[in-house]
Image (cartoon, rainbow, N blue to C red):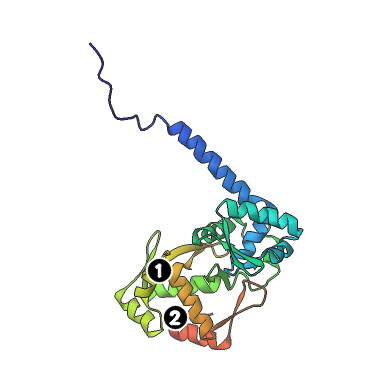
Amino acid sequence: MNRKVSRYADPTANAGRSDELGGRHFASVAALIGEKSRAVMLWNLIEGREYTATELADCAGVSRQTCSDHLSKLVGGGVLTFLQRGRHRYYKFANENVAQVIEKMAYLISPDGTARTPSLSAESGFRYARTCYDHLAGKVAVRLTDALVSAKIVTGHPDKFKVTHRGEEWFRIRGIDIDELCRMKRKFAYPCLDWSERRNHLGGALGAAVLKLLLHNGWIRRKEESREVVVTPKGRIELRNQFAVEI
């Protein structure tokens, strides 16, 4: 009797090969972003603004030709992209997911700071308040996120934040249109693990809108040539009045 052969493939038949290919791809990405000079460039780009090759070369302490080689690899690997403006190219992260990866990798930095690079330890207020791509990070950001959850303006979930009905009105009064943010082609609101606080702060389009609100109102200000931000005297008052955040 002829054995009937199933027309369905064994789902585990190629599992070993898939794992091997996945491992190779992971290793190539890890090597791409793990090289020291490229890592420094990526760390500087996490503040969300665009840099020229010359500026990134200065940040990493390498020649312009070496920097150009690194940037070519990062663009080819889908980590960075660039905008051509006149004779200059301005480099930035290819997408928001790249910024998340870089920030989450920093979580592995030991709490005592022994693994930090010189650029991290140079700014006294860096852990207190800084930008993470296009949203607020640090102790202030974590406290602000906690306050929004406590006031039931947003609710926390494992992989996202949701704005409550009360929260929609609360944000509207402050000039943030939740419906408009939801239509954007990016994540709306997600918990971003804060590497210095070891807890989540608010990321995504909503996090970016909150940072924009704080800057526009003069409650915080950017520190020149740094990701660090400074909470102004007016900001301390308004963070307490508007967000119930004591700092």
Q: Is residue 128 left or right of residue 22?
A: right
Which quadrant: the C terminus? bottom right
Indicate which disc residue 243 carries.
2
Q: Amino acid at mark 1?
A: Met
Which quadrant: the N terminus? top left
Compared with residue 203, is residue 165 higher up or lower down, i.e. above or below?
A: below
Is residue 163 in view? yes
In percent of width and height, residue 8 lies at 29, 30
Tell me which residue sits at (36%, 82%) in the image: 172
Q: Amino acid at mark 2?
A: Phe
Is residue 246 in view? no
Indicate which disc residue 184 carries.
1
Q: Is residue 231 left or right of residue 144?
A: right
Indicate which disc residue 58 carries.
none
Tell me which residue sits at (53%, 39%) in the image: 23
Tell me which residue sits at (48%, 36%) in the image: 19
Q: Is residue 145 left or right of residue 123?
A: left
Q: Quadrant of residue 186?
A: bottom left
Tag 2 and tag 1, C-beta contact below 8 Å: no
The mark closer to the camera, 2 or 1, is: 1
Tell me the element at label 2: helix
In percent of width and height, residue 124 lies at 67, 72
Residue sticking out furthest to the left = 1
In percent of width and height, residue 230 lies at 60, 79
Q: Quadrant of residue 25?
A: top right
Q: Between marks 2 and 1, how big is the CA–CA gap?
A: 25 Å
**Camera-side residue: 230 or 215?**
215
In percent of width and height, residue 196 lies at 58, 64
